[in-house]
Amino acid sequence: MTVILVNCVTLGLYKPCADEVCATVRCRILQVFDHLIFVFFAVEMLVKMTAMGIVGKKAYLAETWNRLDMFIVLAGFVELVSVQWRIRDQLATP
C-alpha cells in the first residue's frame, strides 16, 4: 500500500507540459522513483505468478485485480521500451 501511495505522490508531482525533456533535478528524481516503482510491481507480479501459477482456477489470471495489475505492468513496460527506443533514435540521428 505504501508503494501505491508513493506512486500517487510522484504522479501528482510530475508536470508533463513542463517536463517534455526531463532535464531538471526534480524530473530526474521522479523518473528514478517511477522506475523503482515499476520494478517493484513487476517483481510482485512475477512472484505471484510463480507462487499461484499463471492459468487455472486459483491461478494469477483467475483474479480480476491481478489481470488489471498485469495490464498496468505490461503498459508500463511498453512505455519504458518506447522511451528507450526514442532516446536511442535521437542519439543516432545526426
Image: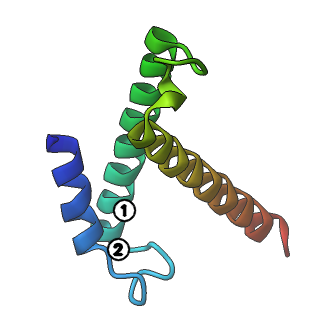
Q: Say if 39 sits above or below 72 in the image.
A: above
Q: Amino acid at mark 1?
A: Arg
Q: Amino acid at mark 2?
A: Thr
Q: Nearer the viewer, residue 19 or 34?
A: 34
* Secondary structure at numbered mark 2: loop
Residue holding disc 2: 24
Q: Nearer the viewer, residue 62 or 78?
A: 62
Q: Residue furthest bottom?
A: 17
Q: Position of residue 5 (x, y in %)?
A: 16, 52
Q: Residue at x 39, y 37 (%)?
A: 41
Q: Say if 42 sits above or below 56 in the image.
A: below
Q: Position of residue 23 (x, y in %)?
A: 43, 73
Q: Residue at x 50, y 19 (%)?
A: 59
Q: Position of residue 53 (x, y in %)?
A: 54, 13
Q: Residue at x 42, y 89 (%)?
A: 17
Looking at the rendered structure, which numbered label has been put on residue 42? none
Q: Alpha-carbon distance for marks 2 and 1?
A: 6 Å
Residue holding disc 1: 28
Q: Say if 22 sits above or below 7 in the image.
A: below
Q: Residue at x 19, y 52 (%)?
A: 6
Whether residues under marks 2 and 1 lie with C-beta atoms below 8 angstroms apart, the answer is yes
